[in-house]
Amino acid sequence: MNQPTHLLDGYKVLDFTQFVAGPTCTLMMAEMGAEIIKVEFAPKGDPTRAFPVMRDGRSGYFVQHNRGKQSICLDLKKPRAVDLIKDLISKVDVLVQNYAPGVIGRLGFDYQVVNEINPRLVMCSISGFGQTGPLAHLTGYDGCGQAFSGFTSMCGEPNEAPYMPMVAFGDVSTGAHAMGAVACALLYRERTGKGQHLDISLLDTYFHYHEAAVQMASLSAGEIEPTRSGRHAYYLAPAGIFKSRDGYMIVAAVEQQWAELCNAMDARNWLTIRASRTIQRVWRI
């Protein structure tokens, strides 16, 4: 009996995604052995195919987020293309899409339809603000999720404009969240025989980044106001970016690491200072 060489060997995924968040989900599944069939709209396909840097007629941006996948380019206004997709839906395990809410339904492939075709199918819908609710109609690029979640307001120097991180924290993390949800849904299907519809949003993903701010503000009844604190953490010390002779370094030394830092700096006279204790005492509610 042949043993699978990757965790998702044998699983098939129909991929209606573009840009970053959705493609990250299916990319991670491809890296674990799943067969990814990426559906692109004729005539140009995924818009990132034209993103720089271009070499030999190929976009590095597109390749980075879509390597290891197979692509088909269809005009879904044509009945033959629709029939082809329905046939694929009957044969795959997962469908991932990250169009704006409502678009996949207008194409004729909302969850009710795909569930009737394949009741075991796991469908994952990725969007900026969820498939339903008061914000669902908004376009959800990474920066939008950053701002709505409060993430942006935590980045930068105090009393100055916030910074925009030049990496796609939210898009990539949303894709990773989606991949985890799909894996759990496949486990559920193995136990019950039933598929399900997953609703993964950029906003929810960004909100998870607040590992301290939400509970601090809430439990202190507003006494603590988490905000931008530049290069240093506002609730731990020493924790932040410090300038050294050769450049900048990140130092995070609390509790047991404090003694090790003092020894490394030949500053043993600082050992009587307990890292982060002053802040902890002031903020104890």
Image: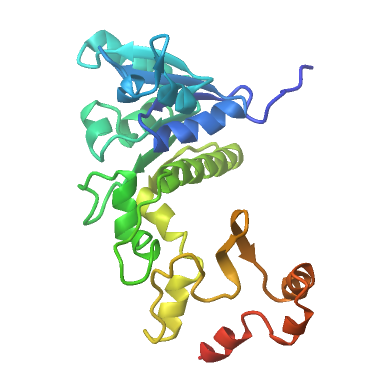
Front-most of residues 246 and 66: 246
Location of residue 192 in the rendering, given as x and y in whole percent from the top left corner:
56, 41
Residue 61 location, quadrant: top left
Above or below, comparing residue 175 to residue 276 in the picture: above
Position of the N terminus, as image quadrant, is: top right
Q: Can residue 80 be seen in this snapshot?
A: yes
Image quadrant in which you'd find residue 186: top right
**With respect to residue 167, does 145 lie above or below?**
below
Residue nearest the observer in this picture, 207 or 154: 154
Residue 99: image location, x then y, percent: 29, 34
Looking at the image, residue 95 sits to the left or right of residue 128; the answer is: right
Visible residue check, residue 129? no
In the image, residue 69 sits, relative to residue 111, either above or below, namely: above
Residue at (25%, 12%) from the top-left corner?
43
Residue at the location (24% across, 49% down)? Answer: 136
Q: Residue furthest front?
A: 245
